Amino acid sequence: MKQSQQSNDPLASPPGMISVTVDGRTVLVPRTMPDWQGRQVPTTMLQACELAGVTVPHYCYHPKLPVAGNCRMCLVEYGVPALGPDRKPVRQPDGSLVIKKSPRPAIACATPVSPGMEIYTSTPTVKLMRQSVLEFLLINHPLDCPICDQAGECKLQEYSVEYGRASSRFAETKVHKNKQIDLGPRIMLDQERCILCSRCIRFTRDVVGDDALGIINRGSYSAIAAYPGTTFDNNYTLNTADICPVGALTSKDFRFQMRVWFLKETMSLCASCGTGCNIVIGSRENCIYRFTPRQNDAVNSCWMCDYGRLNYRWIERTDRLTRPGGSKLTSPDWEDAINGIAAALKKAVPGHIAIVASARLTNEELYLVRRLAQFLGAPTDCVPRSGPADNLLLCADRNPNTKGAQLLGIAASPPGVNLPVFARLIRNGTIRSLLVFGEDVTRHGITADDLARLDFLAASDIHTNGTTAVSHYFLPGCAHVEKRGSFTNVHGRIQRFEKAVDPPGLARPELHWLRELVCRVTGQSMGGTVESVFEAMRAEVPAFRNIAWADLGDHGVATHG
Amino acid sequence: MSWALPKEVEEKVDSLVGRYPQPRSAVVMVLHALQEHFGCISPEAIEWTARKLGLRPINVLELVTFYPMFRREPFGRFHLRICRTLSCALAGSHQLHRHICERLGLNPEKPGPQTSADGLFTVEFVECLASCGTAPVIMCNETQHEQMTIEQVDKLLDECRCKCRTERQGGLAAEHGFEP
């Protein structure tokens, strides 16, 4: 009996842990937890409640931003063990602790937990406080949800339904502010909808390091603003629209385009640089409306850059390749195209054929290219892409899978170093056949005249380009949003992504036709799914050994590369 | 750039900055010094202060728009501050405010400081001037006027006008070289 009492004693927790009770349920929580920068700091009541499975509503608190504690939405009641005159906890006759309830509530986001603390999140007082906070927030709110882009993912809407009053008692005139402030090239501000949580200010000041926003004026007239004459224009501004809990900051790219509840959400990756930020693609009826960041603390935290976020319009360009073609293909038929290419490759002589593959292809596709190259005895390389990097997420390597191409032996070292060699070998007649997957080599040192010398040229890409225009066979490929697969980011983390939309016309994922080509040319058989190609890859490539497709999960794993 | 800070003001600012462990802590005092010199805080003054203290202009603008004692437009020659805290309010400061506004052609309902069309007077309500025993109290520039009545207010306004006229004549005299 005494034993069980001892083990249930909230003051006798294992080292590094604290026992707290949330709404009557006792849980063990770590004494410290990572703050927004990952430093270990005392666990807060809000974190403890989350660990206990109890939601505490909040506006200004964000796990990846410094705590401001200004919205007061997370107010809870709490009590701590009462101490006797001897400074020892007072116990009931049955040995349980006497809890002394605090006379005042506390903000859960900024109050650390202490051993034996009891947190009450559903008392009448807490409910009344939440109602009152919401009532104040709504005093000057325009209630223009029908024309607001945030509707459907608005914390003000959600909490009003869950914790608010049905009707307002505010009979006076609302303060009107500016509803259309052009804050920067990508962000629009509606000052009336703003609840002044200061998340955007903290994000741009503390995460990006561009202290561009502030709160001007005071009282009911307070408003978010940039300094007059300046624009809010860093590469991360659109994250403020994501973290804005209401519809005050909206993306100029997305506003008035689509109701968020119609969007299909697909787990994907950003393919605009080698960082591989985790994203959610919002699409409807085969049309992409937005990219939003998906939390992955090993890669991008909760953020992504504006450059990557807005780099999707090209997918809908009208010059997409929608069917197989080329000078030697009489009808736009996949079977004929694969057969034609396979027949030509069977005749190709090792040493006289080369392959240029794109570092925008997936690991699985590049693995198939590797199989083909090994069988044909063909040297390979990728086209490098680079641009200015920044100190947050954007990486100088603008290919999403350079690391994968390196681990699979497709990319030369450094990537692209073989391209001038290929050009020379084409000019002197050594290379007679060339396969180009997903690139336009005419923009990377191999001219259309060089290509005209070849006996055989097959190319694939997403758009028509200088190489597909002169190739004997060309195959239409897919943007990464149109297929499944995995990329390996610059730090060697392998992450998977899912298909959001269908490719146009007869275009098919590279994996499908590369597999057919490999089987046809080598005579080997092979499963046709991404998973089966991945299985074959990990059996063969040391960097991917011990990694199963299922292990990738939503956040990926580190390769051994 | 036409905006320039005299050397002595900059020296004053430097000495203010030196009083604090961090330059940014001096921002309110620096703004007071600039307002004292220029009469108001212009965008140039905000930007200069931000550069001086290693801040972004928006940080300074937040302060300037938050504190009512910082003004972004020049005030009149005479700054009338009418107390509206309890004692003065009970003793009729609202009536005094209304009377002054009506005499100067200002809207008594409008919140915030207002300047008369001739640029002579700026009138505003302020909170307690710490002279509750002699309510209602009005400050005209740095002089406190106690137990004010409508008549005394009229007298005060006339005195101010008179003083201003003398000043102008003095100015004209200095300009044209004759004795006033």
Image (cartoon, coloured by chain):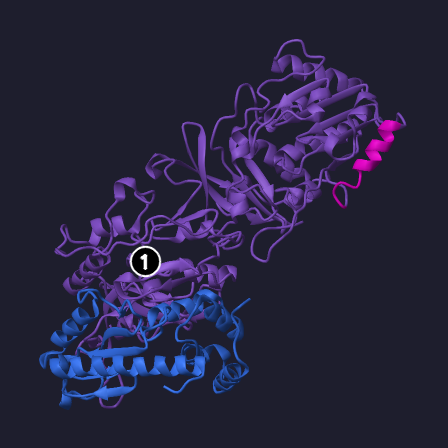
The residue identified by callout 1 is A59
Task: Give residue A19's quadrant in the image.
Answer: bottom left
Q: Residue at x 26, y 40 (%)?
A: A146
Counting other residues with Cα less than 10 Å from the Cα at mark 1, is it few (<14), some (14-19), or many (20 or more)? many
Element type at marker 1?
loop
B109 horizontally vs A528: left or right:
left
Question: Could you tell me residue B104's position as x and y percent?
Answer: 21, 70
Q: Residue furthest right?
A: A428
Residue B174 found in image quarter = bottom left
Residue that appears at 48% across and 44% down: A279
Does the segment drawn in magenta span residue A196? no
Q: Which residue does the image show at 29% across and 78% down from the upper left?
A: B78
Give A14 or B116, whichever is nearer the viewer: B116
Colour purple belongs to chain: A
* Colour-to-chain, blue: B
The residue located at (40%, 63%) in the rendering is A214
Quick check: B132 above or below A313?
Answer: below
Secondary structure mostly seen in the magenta stretch: helix
Q: Does residue A343 appear anywhere in the picture?
A: yes
Q: Quadrant of the N terminus of chain A?
A: bottom left
Residue A224 position by quadrant: bottom left
Disc 1 marks which amino acid? Tyr
Frontmost residue, A365 versus A314: A314
- Can you name the residue that lies furthest to the front here? B178
Q: Is residue A90 visible?
A: no
Q: Which x, y percent locates residue A544? A: 63, 44
**What span is colored magenta in the figure?**
A414-427
